[in-house]
Image: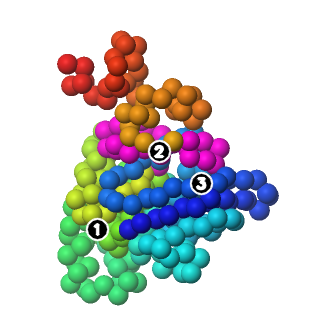
Amino acid sequence: MKIEIKNLIHRYSSGDIALNGISTVIEGTEPIAIIGQNGAGKTTFVKHLNGLLRPTEGELLINGENIEKHTTAFWSRKIGYVFQNPDNQLFLESVRKEFEFGPKQQGISKREINERLEKISDLVGLTDKLSVHPFDLNATEKKFCTIGSILMMNPEVIILDEPTCGQDIMGNQRLTKIIAALQSNNQLCLTITHDMKFVVKNFDQIVVMSKGKILKRDTKEIIFSTPDILKASHISPPPITRVGQKLGFSQPVFNKDEFQ
């Protein structure tokens, strides 16, 4: 899939500008992290990618087709969005029903749904919770329930909005497994996150946003070696990277093995 964003501007009804002239191209299957302080425009930006929000000005093309030509329901089949707050997404009586709902709307066969259900429930760690009401899950399980419900629709692109919020170490490890599985399945994962340790572990490509603009888009090595960009976006490198910088390493380090 190729997503082209051309001079994207979004104004709130109040007149305030949330996005101020974003232009970029997103394609391929290499996972991309979108980072920046609160209010940078990250969530507003990604909500344009499947039509949850529409441009005030500018143009957004998906495989050459203007997003304005179709409904959000149409685009959500291709680009799935996992909300930051699971309670904004869950609405059915069991995890199983949450997982089955999307594919049923797509007209997927019962056999295919069952095959997906087995695979996805294992991937998100909810195989033993399929009969449980989503609101009886703990916070971590709720998050994986929302991720699983989107994965069940097999979109070409999946957007994760702050997936590490409330996660423990095991949850973060599962997220790493999911991101890797998506790439192996030729699906693109875009992830908004404030967790820089999670970023450097799972993403080589990073988009830095501030004040409704993309400040820089590059590899993690370049991003965390550019003090001006980090300062302007109020981003702090992971602790281990900061240690390497204090020691005078010429290249940023992202794990203990790189100290050797």
Is 146 colored magenta in this rendering? no
Can residue 208 be found in the magenta stretch? Answer: yes
Query: Mark 2, mark 1: which one is toward the viewer?
Result: 2
Indicate which disc, 2 or 1, sits on the residue closer to the N terminus: 1
Q: What kind of residue is marked 1?
A: Leu
Dot 3 alpha-carbon crowd within 10 angstroms: few under 14, some 14 to 19, many 20 or more: some
Q: Secondary structure at mark 2?
A: strand
Q: For mark 1, give the secondary structure.
A: loop
Q: Which residue is mark 2?
A: 217
| Corner quadrant of residue 234 | top right
Reply above or below: 139 against 236. below
Q: How is the image coloured?
A: rainbow
Dot 1 crowding, Cα within 10 Å, few <14, some 14–19, many 20+? some
Q: Residue furthest right?
A: 14
Vertical position of residue 109 compared to residue 244: above or below: below
Direction from residue 256 to residue 163 in the image, left or right? right
Amino acid type assigned to the residue bearing label 2 in the image:
Arg
Q: Which mark is residue 155?
A: none
Quadrant for residue 15, please give it. bottom right
Q: Whole-percent x and y of residue 140?
A: 37, 50
Alpha carbon of mark 3 to alpha carbon of mark 1: how far?
41 Å
Disc number for residue 130: 1
Q: CA distance from mark 2 to mark 1?
A: 40 Å
Tell me the magenta residue range.
192-215
Can you tell which of label 3 and label 1 is closer to the viewer? Answer: 3
* Above or below 60: residue 24: above
| Marks 3 & 2, CB-CB < 8 Å contact | no
Percent from the top left, x then y, of residue 245? 39, 18
